[in-house]
Amino acid sequence: MNYKDTLKYMYDALPMFHRQGKTAYKKDLTNIKALCDALDSPQQKFKCIHIAGTNGKGSVSHMMAAVLQAQGYKTGLYVSPHYKDFRERIKINGNYISRNYITQFVEKNMDLFNQVAPSFFEMTVALAFSYFNNQKVDFAIIETGLGGRLDSTNIVQPILSIITNISWDHSDLLGDTLEKIAHEKAGIIKSNTPVVIGRKQAESESVFRNKAKELAAPIYFAEEIVKLSAIQGSKGLDKVLFDFDGTHESVKPSLNGIYQLENMNTVLAACSVLNALGLLHIYSSSIASAFENTAELTHIIGRWQQISSSPDVFVDSAHNEDGVKYLVHQIKEIPYNKLHFICGFVKDKPIDNVLSQLPKDASYYFVKASIPRALDEKDLLEQAKTHGLIGRSYKKPKQALRKAKAQAGKDDLIVVSGSIFVVGEIL
């Protein structure tokens, strides 16, 4: 079996949530436990930090990995989903897992997969844990896929848990109130293990405090223990300033979206807690280096990323109510002549609250990503009209981008957003 055949087996034979939706979601940990038991429990053989939340958990995961790399640790990073290459999900010090390891892992464990019948995500988590153990990482940063309590990653015993924030997403699976969603995210809190909460919110604070008290887990709210400030430039954050361990730092962040300020504050708080509890000793210079070089150190993509200029073209995978609120705020801070907005979404999530926030004075290009879950571009066009958004539909994201570039002046702004799969096809 070659690498291409291996991926085909994984995509075709194993239910894949991010392509298929809720039919591929499994609400228990039975399969991942069976897989890891058969693999000699690799998740128990390395130290890790476990990260959940509605928005920002991917950015926080990459920045935490960058901090540990800058500190000199061999650092594994597991995130999901991927934009272009499956191997984006599993990295060590920013380097993708090898194709050979993936192929050999699948070939070696084919009988196990046939017996357990895992989902794509369950198999991928087991692969990541096996790889990190095999490569003897010092630490691994593990991002949840969906929720927390029943997420396949939730069999780790971390030294620290982080929950970024709570907002509306996957409410059909996680609950129809923010409190219910918070309960699912709180499922990653472990007994006697510190947890950092990135955003203090009325709807979730008591949920997190009660869960932490039940498990004797020290709980910290980031905004109560650290504070960053920022100088904003014309296209994002220009400088971030913070004090840590008696040292003042001023850095130009490589992830410069305005919303990243909260994520950086969460990372700074996590580092402060790790130091205060004697779990690690992280230097302020490592944090500064990480913030300046996260993109280079971890190869993160798709977060307020400029991909061309004249006209400026930015991609950002904001796809829910909270994410789009920050994206719209970002756009308002940028000087431009006319806004061209390319977007596409999945069909199994309500998007009225997303569409209602988008600027009414933009030219819209409605698209459909090449996955089964994608919302039809013509249906999106009709739904958008009810919110006063005017534009045309296109079958492919790249076709829409070519059209937008042809119609835009050099001082216009083109933004590509919505489903991660739309952004992935553009990158």
Image (cartoon, rainbow, N blue to C red):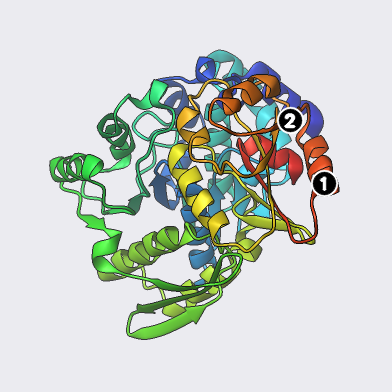
Residue type of the residue flagged with mark 1:
Gln
> Percent from the top left, x then y, of residue 194?
26, 54
- Is residue 48 in view from this perspective? yes
- Which residue has dot 2 on it? 392
In this rendering, position of residue 353 left or right of residue 308 = left
Q: Up-down: is 8 above or below 278? A: above
Q: Which mark is residue 407?
A: 1
Q: Residue at x 61, y 43 (%)?
A: 89
How far apart marks 2 and 1 lie (CA) works out to 13 Å
Q: How many marks?
A: 2
Q: Nearer the viewer, residue 133 or 51?
A: 51
List x then y, in percent, for residue 146: 45, 33
169 shown above or below 223: above
At 52% from the left and 41% from the top, the residue drawn is 129
Which of 386 and 189 lies nearest the eye of the viewer? Answer: 386
Give residue 229's mark: none
Q: Which type of secondary structure does the marked residue at label 2 adopt? A: strand
Question: Could you classify mark 2 by the number of other residues whose Cα lies within 10 Å: few (under 14), some (14-19), or many (20 or more)?
Answer: some
Let me know if residue 138 appears in the view: no
Q: Is residue 4 left or right of residue 102?
A: right
- Horizontal and vertical percent for residue 161? 34, 50
Above or below: residue 395 compared with residue 51: above
Residue visible at 65% across and 56% down? 305
